Image (tube, rainbow, N blue to C red):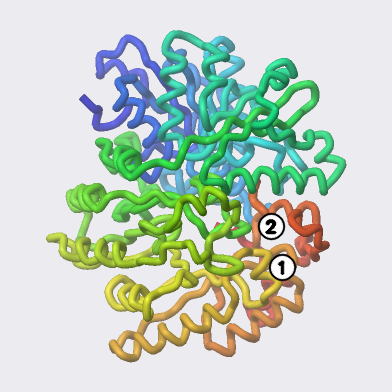
Amino acid sequence: MAARFLPTSAKEVEALGWDYIDVILFSGDAYIDHPSFGVAVIGRILESEGYRVAIVPQPNWRDDLRDFKKLGAPRLFFGVSAGSMDSMVNHYTAAKRLRHDDAYTPGGQYGFRPDYAVTTYTRILKELYPHTPVIIGGIEASLRRLTHYDYWSDRLKPSVLIESGADLLMYGMGDKSIIEVARALHNGYNAKLLRKLRQVAFVADGDYVAGLPADQTIRLNSYEQCCTSGKAFGDNFVKMEVESNRMEQNKYLVEPTGERFVVINPPHAQMTTDELDHSFDLPYSRLPHPRYKGKTIPAYEMIKHSVNIHRGCFGGCSFCTISAHQGKFVTSRSERSILAEIEKVKQLPDFKGYLSDVGGPSADMYRLGGKNTELCKKCTRPSCLTPRVCPNLNRNLTPLLDLYRKVREVKGIKKAFIGSGIRYDIPDDGGRYMREVIVNHTSGRLKVAPEHTEPHVLKLMRKPMWEEFEKLHRFFGQVCRENGLRYQLIPYFISSHPGCTEEDMKKLSTKTRSLGLMTDQVQDLTPTPMTLSSVMFYTGHNPYTGEKLYVANSYEAKCQQKSYFFKGRKTSPTRKK
């Protein structure tokens, strides 16, 4: 029988009558038993397979390490994640100033996770338990699996596998991988067996690499070559991104680092609807662990009355980590699973009938994808929407509109809002979808992300041209007038993106004010690992074309770009969420 919460202490383990634990998961976040939090998902999946799982949330790494010792060694392995965010994005602003809060910690308090949390936790565990495997995963590990630009130290860092000493890395969404890893370790550590798994990465020697099939192996430039050549680093990114955009991936990526080699095995095939439903249908309590009683966790408050309807995003924005982690191809949940989760949300003691979001990485990609999958198998485009909408893209938004209608008809639901971002460049039959969202699913403010106004900057961002937003602006106003709605359209913008000059920001300011827009929703670019924007920021070039780019990479230049949103008043940059 599934426990209401997975145990987090020796006392809770004892109460369950366990004399051993199969897997112990360490996380940089507080433990919230909800499908929006990765460690809870991994824990519940393992539990559904019959394993005994415990979670150690936000362990203290600065004392006598009692949090790392309190449960002893697991029978199979330790799992380590920084949490729902990269720990450095979580800790610092785009100006590299320390934040004073943490949305994933009770009370929003700062200081409950270390910088580079995956590396810190893993090193401690390997020191205390050298013979117990440590498997790393989550977004921090996933996006740092190869040589990457680390904005906060302003240098290239090698794979997190090299720095942490972890035995294995699971990249991307771990629903399938975690089951295979647990099975492979069931009878003890077996490196040969683990290295055969899909969607994992590890460090190997030259003999192992020499044995890989030559026609299925992509040899990347070494970490050392990347450190001396921006072009070598850019070439690595292009090869990695092109492979990750394939529907069918069967190539091994190999990156030399010193005398060793980081090997990235091909990923699993895209999840099916049934597989995704299984992950969401597990018996989550949907609550923070009782250890936090009386305390508010801001990240939980934001999502507790929301429902995620799909994974993946084919938008391909240059600065976004979603496609790099969740994948380009969208997997949607069934209506049954979504409506069943809404029934669970209704049972929460503080639910008043309002769903804060029925969405996903992009709200309007539910059940969208290629009409002819054989064509998709030949394609390596990072985006199905830019520079132009793919003619093979299924643009039928009727299933999503039908889902919205069924959600509205659920007894006890007063309003279901769409809080996720909307790709307004997905062709919409006569504005049918957008009209539905504005009239029935907007709380008063509709948020969209044009990000910029100037064509050359938008092209580098892989975002639709400004004219598309202007069409939306006119349509939004028309629908509001027709329905007597006094709603606001709130656009989000990015300053200091590679290729963006001060003159470009001046034009952006002029164009947005001419439309009477509120332009206080601007975020200064934070170059996050494994994104095209971070590669351009570090190298000063577009790795696909070799084009040299202007980069506002000083504190003063960043402040000046952002100041155009505040009538000439300089202000400190803030991060891109």
Quarter of the image that includes the C terminus: bottom right
First in sequence: mark 1 vs mark 2: 2
Q: What residue type is labelled 2?
A: Ala
From what the image shows, is residue 170 above or below residue 547? above
Local secondary structure at mark 1: helix
- Residue linked to disc 2: 95
Q: Residue at x 41, y 60 (%)?
A: 365
Q: Which of 70 and 35 is in front in this view?
A: 35
Provide residue 204's location: percent of width, then percent of height: 68, 20
Point out the residue furthest to the right here.
228
Q: How many residues crowd around disc 2 within 10 Å: few (fewer than 14), some, or many (20 or more)?
A: some
Provide residue 54's location: percent of width, then percent of height: 37, 24
Q: How many numbered marks does the figure carry?
A: 2
Is the residue under label 2 in contact with that under label 1 (CB below 8 Å)? yes
Local secondary structure at mark 2: loop
Q: Residue at x 69, y 80 (%)?
A: 568
Q: What residue type is labelled 1?
A: Cys
Residue 334 in view, yes or no: yes
Residue 278 horizontal side relative to residue 188, left or right: left
Q: Quadrant of residue 381?
A: bottom right
Provide residue 565's location: percent of width, then percent of height: 63, 77
Q: Residue at x 29, y 27 (%)?
A: 48
- Residue linked to disc 1: 559
Q: Nearer the viewer, residue 160 or 33?
A: 160
Provide residue 571's location: percent of width, then percent of height: 67, 69
Q: In which quarter of the image is residue 274?
A: top left
Residue 309 horizontal side relative to residue 535, left or right: left
Residue 288 horizontal side relative to residue 166, left or right: left
